[in-house]
Image (tube, coloured by chain):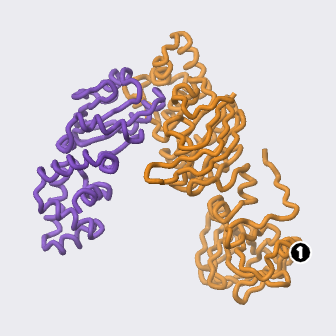
Amino acid sequence: MGVLSFKGIKKIYDGNVQAVADFNLEVQDKEFIVFVGPSGCGKSTTLRMVAGLEDITEGELVIDGRRVNNVPPKDRNIAMVFQSYALYPHMSVFDNMAFGLKLRKRPKDEIKKRVDDAAQILGLQDLLDRKPKALSGGQRQRVALGRAIVRNAEVFLMDEPLSNLDAKLRVQMRAELIKLHERIKTTTIYVTHDQIEAMTMADRIVVMNDGYIQQVGTPSEVYDYPNNLFVGGFIGTPAMNFIKGRLDNDGHFIINKTKIKLPKAKWDNLKEKGYANKEMVFGIRPEDIHDDNVVKETYPDAVVNFKVDVAELLGSETNITAKFEEQLVIARVDARTDININDNIELVFDMNKSHFFDPETQERVREKDEVIKRNK
Amino acid sequence: MNQHTILIHAQHTLKPFKSLFEGFFPQAQIHYETPKTLFINIPQTEEPENPEDLYHLLLSDLEEKITLINMPLAGSALLSNELFAKSIPALPSGYYDYETFLIEVIKHFPNIQTVIKRNIASILNPTLISNMIALGKYNLNVSNAASALYVHRNTLIYRMDSVKEKTGIDVKQFEGLMIFYLLFR
């Protein structure tokens, strides 16, 4: 079992620097949880508190029903993988993987069995006699993972394990880590600042900022229903567009001289919650801004004239950075569309996919019938 | 990497460490040890291993709070081994480069701060110290600081290198310069 329970965990460094504030989370057995957020948001500190490398200032950390606040790291039954895929240069792959077990004075035959099993899972059987220098970056990373696997720990803690790899290898290792988790099903807490890693690997994502949890949810929940402006802006590449404006009393969102009509259900909901005639932030993902005529006909009142600032052809699609009413917006359109800088174009917002945020609280206004589809 | 010293402190035991160093850093020599702290001299090598890698390896194998400080050889001029060994356990565990470690020591131990200040003042002449403060005042901009000091920028760069050579503190880094600011400004 690998069930973790964070109850009001706080980390305050001396000098009153608050790294983690009131962290509450239940991690289920076999779950792959990803902590994501910008540098300094407290994600690594939280991981280090689970590992026992940082003291918990306040709150309770429970692993498998046992309070572990004061349990030393080696008695927590966890295994750690760090971003430097460092290995002992003078030891063979086998010895590198076996070293932690030897320190714990496990019997020789047990060590051999565990290392062989881990090597088989990771496809390292033929490399066990090699020294780290004779391995490629990807192979070294797998050995580093093997060092964690042999421990048969209840929980894996991974601190940006892929960030030292080049882009191609990172994609490959990401897939391998997903497959590995499918096979060994060990509860994993994975820390990254890379939201693509978070989206592709996680059962659930924990988005953090300034020491606070901003949102916990499946990748699709976090992407489609961001709790606030931070999550909307952090998850997704390019980020969600935020456009400042005002709602009128008649179901329109007004940005200077541009008027966009809201779908009835959205307007009714906003009106009921008292947002009529209020300043709002309108959020829309780049892929929900279209240039094709079918969508323009569906939402004739959400068609807006833009002036193209930059057009980036990515192969399968084009990212257009365009300006309207002095605000920059990024739209992702079909690569076959012929667009040049300084062109005047018409784009349309898919209003059913739009979000409205309260500029004061920064929170998203929830829909009345918001049904969150869980992706797993 | 030039010849340098690694300071390792473990909360419980250092026993398993010793055998590792020979492999990780060939020709390494332990030159000071207490029951929980080791000072190891690492000779200059062509393909040096990264001390931070060693820190992560030890952490994943031993699973206890470890502090590892990577210190240039000149660092020993600022504090005695005894004072270094005394200050390490009181700091949050982790990997420190030399400058960050000194800042932590200065923050936590007013009495050791005095010793460091006195030792720097005895190693460096007052001009060098005031030049470093000027460098901080001009936001690490060597050209601007040099013209304010009426010296050629190469002279100031030479002096910065000289500070590093004598104290181990790299004043080309923000943290390094901050030490001078904390102590002498």
Snapshot quadrant of residue A326: bottom right
Quadrant where the image shows the N terminus of chain A: top right
Q: Amino acid at mark 1?
A: Lys
For the view shown, which residue lies furthest in the bottom direction? A257
Residue A335, visible in the rendered structure: no
In the visual, does A294 lie left or right of B15? right
Residue A310, visible in the rendered structure: yes
In the depicted view, which residue is nearer to us: A249 or A162?
Answer: A249
Q: Position of residue B67 (x, y in %)?
A: 38, 36
Residue at x 34% of width, y 47% of height:
B108
Chain painted purple: B
In the visual, does B169 lie left or right of B158? right
In the depicted view, which residue is nearer to us: B10 or B16?
Answer: B10
In the depicted view, which residue is nearer to us: B55 or A168?
Answer: B55
The chain identifier of the residue carrying mark 1 reads: A
In the visual, does A187 lie left or right of A356? left
Q: For mark 1, does the 10 Å Cα neighbourhood hold few (<14), some (14 to 19), or many (20 or more) residues? A: few
Q: Position of residue A186 (x, y in %)?
A: 66, 31
Chain painted orange: A
Pointer 1: what residue?
A264
In the visual, does B101 lie left or right of B62? left
Residue at x 68% of width, y 73% of height:
A359
Residue at x 77% of width, y 67% of height:
A365
Residue A61 vertical position relative to residue A271 in the rendered view, above or below: above
In the depicted view, which residue is nearer to us: A168 or A92?
Answer: A92
- Dot 1 lies on which element? helix
